[in-house]
Structures are given as structure tokens and as C-alpha cells.
Image: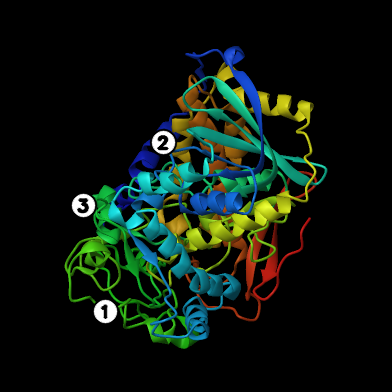
Amino acid sequence: MSRRTFMGATAGVVGAAAFASMAFGAEPVVNRPKINASQFRQSTQETDVLVIGGGMAALFAAVKAHDAGAKVTMVAKGRLGSSGLTPFAKGIFSYDKSNASMSIDDFVAGVSESAIGTNNPVFTRQLAEHSYDRVQELKSWGFFDSALYANSFKRPIEERGIPVIERVMITHLVKDKGRVVGASGFSLDENDILHFSARTVVLCTGSGGFKPSGFPVCDLTHDGSIMAYDIGAKITGKEWNDGHPASAKNSGSCYDNWHGQVEERPSVTGVGINHHLGVDLNYRAYRLGGPVEMGPPKPGSHKNETFSEVPGGPYVPLAFRQAGGPPPPPQDQGLLSLFRQNKPGGPPGMGGESVGGSSAGMAIHKSEGIVPIDDTGLSTVPGLYAAGDALGSYMSGGIYTQIGSSLAGSAVQGAIAGEAAAKASAGVVRVPMPENRLEQINEEILAPLKRERGYSPAWVTQVLQAVMIPNFVLYIKKERMLNGALAYVEELKEHHVPMLLAEDRHHLRLAHETRNMIVTAEMKLKASLMRKESRCSHYRLDYPEIDDENWQAWINIYKDADGNMQLEKQPFDRWPDQA
């Protein structure tokens, strides 16, 4: 596989162009704003529970918070039912206790085996116990009647009269007297800054990536995690990598190749435990070149085993090596069409010239995000909850274990977090957002519009992509390359982020997204350096073995009193303490 082909499949061609511009020394450009920052209006709204997001987790969080008696407001960067990865998911897991092929205990144990201990069994069990009820509610709203989700999402929201404010990018969480008291952001359509005073906040902002070209994750840039990190919440899971493949011939088709056609209606998936979409494909590409064909998972280096094609490689538990996921179904329709044979860019067990890394910057669903202190998704910051891909619940650990579990997990976690946030809000006396802090936030939001000279978000993003997306940095890791990439990322954070420019609201959004991606990149590199072992979707070429003696733990990241990034271990069997 040529470098150009590989980089093209992982969005690296754009990044390579950025490196070329770096070689000639890109100079700051003069800003020529098309809108006047002084003309922005500001307003403040009050609510009990503020739900940030517009996907599956946000839907259930808002519905259940309302049903628990709270006044609820939803605010989303996109549109309800059309935000983040939700509209592209076509399968939803459902554990039907009446006819399940295994008990819940066996299901949790099987997931733990596949995840090599990285899952949190509390959230794994939660998925099995509540997924069926959430699927039944979705059926009653018409979710399975259309390939588009907006109408089915609107039904329960409109029935309850829950206000939804769309196309507003929330950039800041507001904390006072030790707890979250609201959030702030700006409209993508009007010159408006919006402040939301809330007793509790539920982050359903999804995950994110580095705006790769082969996966529909480009509007997700880890906004929720970085906002929460900025006010003291702990973040986890940044060393893991999502391994969705892309076709080397047409990288933009990867999501159809893996999940079926976007036009298809969603369907229910049953109980089945897999071990797939890690970085075994990336390892094969690194060692063999290309073209690379996907196949069943192979043994790794753990306990002196050998990879069938080349030495070493990610370890796959014995029970999951030959299956490569569930067997091909007899029919060839709906979600199950993803198992078609000889289709390029498909899941394990399928032929085709493929490249892993189309979703660069994203981790395994539910393995990264805000650290919970209990099973409701409450964070280490009082009053702040999270659900779905914004919550580092480790529902399936550092590897994919079920098809459709991510969408179901978002529904389940959203419902639980929303109800918990509503009950908690009833006992909270509203704390007004400090006026001096709101003035500071206004300045921070509009700063890219006011700068006279600096760097465009597009150029800085291209540099970031060039640094982070290469296979030998993000996926097949070793200390020398991680440290080299970290030097670039720290330079971007320290020098270029304070000089990001915006000429209009669109570029203002890009500026804030670029900053979030850069902080995420720093987290990913530092967490990858810290975990000196290989496990699930984290692979260190210089530490290829599983190290159970030192690494039966997750990595949490937080900001210390001086504003510096710190990392800590959290044992697999322990909840963290709240601040």
C-alpha cells in the first residue's frame, strides 16, 4: 500500500498538504471579519435540567428528565435526530429476557472476556437490563418506520413540550461554588450568545475525531469532554482507538461498507459477543504493506503466541479468534447486509482491500469520555452528568463486543442520566451564573473574531491531521513517535490556539472545534505513552504484551490547580471520588 493511498484513506492527504505548507513556513494572515463582534446579542435562559446534544442519548435524557418532573431544555449543535453519529447507526441491540440465548450473567462475563477486563460490568449489565424497554419505546415513536430519525425523535419531545434550541454550539460549562450551574455558547445562524442557567446538566455531546474523510464524525470534536475537563471533570479512555475500516479506493464509502446503506431503516440486533474493530488491520498494514484484506482475528503476541502472517500483533482472546464475529446470516438485507462476502471495506470475515483508521481520533464507542462516579453517569463535578459516547462508561471496554450496542447504550444511559439529573435538580437551590464569569466567556467565545492576525482553523486542523492520523502515530504506537507528535501538538496548543481566527460564525465554530481537537490530541498521546502495554484497541510496538500486573486499570485525565494536564490510574474495580 502506497503512503499516498493509505493517507488518503485516513484523511492524511489533507494533512500532508499542511506539512508541505509548514516546510515553507506558514505566516499569520490578516483577519477580515465579515461580521462585527460588537453586534452580538446575549441572553440568559433558566431551566432545571439542561440537556446538551441532539442524538439518541439526548433524546432519552430529555424525555426521562421531563417525566421525572423537571423543566428541561435541549440545546444541540446540529438538529434533533440528525446530530452526530446517531443518524448513521442502523442497528440497535436488544436483550429480550424472554428468549435470550444466554443469561445476563453469562452475557456480562462474555463481554468481560472479550474486552480483556477493560469493561465496566456495571454498565455492561445496565445495557442488558434496560435495552429491551428502550427499544420498545422507540418502536412506539415510529423509530423503525423510516431511515430518517428526525420525526420519531420529535414525537415524544413535542408531546411533552420540551423546548429544543438547535444549531447552537455550546463552548463553555459554568461552575460556581463547586458545582456546575449552567452552560454558554453561540448561535450558528444569528449573532447571538446564549447563556443557560441550570440546576443540573446532562452532556450528550457524543465522541469526536480529527475530522477524517472516511467516517461521518466530522461535526463531532469532543466538545463535551473538553468543556467538562476545563471545569475540573475527569476524562478517560483516550488511548483506545476505533478501528472502523475504509475502502482504499473510496474512503468516503466506509460507513456504508460497514453499517449498510444509510437509506435503510434501522433494525434490532440480538445477543452476540464479538471482538472486532481493534487495530489488528492497522498492524497488518504496518508490517506487510498492502493491499490488506480483512479476515478473522488472529492470535497476537500474548503468552508467546504468534500472528499467523507476521510476528507480534494485537492479542485476541482464544474464544474470538476464528469466529470473526457472528456467522453470515441466510438473508442479505437490512443491517445484516453488512456481512455480504467480497464487499470491500467490510467487517472481519469479509474480503476487500481496506484500511483501518477512517474514524481517526475517535475511540471505541463508550470507552472514552467523562469519568462517572456511579451508574447514573454523574461526573466528578457535582451536578454534571453524561451519557452515550460522551460518557466514559466502558460499557464494552476497549474493543467492540456487540453490533448495535452503542446505539442501545446511548438510549439506556440517556434515560438513566436524565432521570437522575431531574431528581437531583429538585434538591438544588439555583445558583446564578456569575456576571464577571459570563463577561469573560463572552470574550473567549468572540476572541477569534476580534484578532487582527493569526492562523485559520482549517490550516491548523490540517497540521493536526498530518501529525496525528498516520498509522505509525495513532494506531501502531511507540514512544519515539508519540513524543515527536506530542511536541508538535503542544506547539499548536501553546502558540497557534491563542492565534486562531474567524471571519464569520462558521469559522468561529471551526476555531473552537480546532482547539478541542488539539486538547484531545494531547490527551491521546499522553495516555498512550502512559499505558506501557498492549490491550484491546491500544497497541504499543515497544510494549506488545498485556501487563496484568501493572495495568488492570483505566487512565483518567484531569486539570490540576495550576491548569496543567495530569494523568492517573483508576483500578478496574473501583469508582473514583467526586471533587
Q: Are marks 2 and 3 in contact (CB under 8 Å)?
A: no
Q: What numbered label is drawn on residue 249? A: 3
Q: Which residue is mark 2?
A: 18
User: Counting residues from the N terminus, which is met first, the one under dot 3 or under dot 1?
Assistant: 3
Q: Can you see residue 396?
A: no
Secondary structure found at label 3: loop
Left or right: residue 525 versus residue 278 is right
Single out the residue that lies furthest toward the front: 159
Q: Could you tell me residue 531's position as x and y percent?
A: 60, 67
Above or below 212: residue 533: below
* Mark 3 neighbour class, 10 Å CA radius: few under 14, some 14 to 19, many 20 or more: some
Residue 429 pos. (x, y %): 80, 43
Q: Quadrant of the N terminus?
A: bottom left
Please give the name of the residue rendered at 67% of the width and 58% of the height, measured from the top-left corner. 378
Q: What amino acid type is highlighted by mark number 2? A: Ala
Whether pointer 3 and pointer 1 mark residues with C-beta atoms closer than 8 Å, the reply is: no
Residue at 59% across, 78% down: 547
Quadrant for residue 500, please give it: top right
Q: CA distance from mark 2 to mark 1?
A: 43 Å
In the image, residue 12 lies at what x, y percent? Answer: 36, 46
- Residue shown at the point (60%, 73%) measured from the top left: 122
Which comes before the other along the chain, label 2 or label 3?
2
Q: Nearer the viewer, residue 266 or 317?
A: 266
Residue under label 1: 327
- Picture layout, residue 34 above or below residue 386: above
Q: Amino acid at mark 3?
A: Lys
Q: Say which element carries label 1.
A: loop
- Asked whether 133 or 543 is in front, the reply is 133
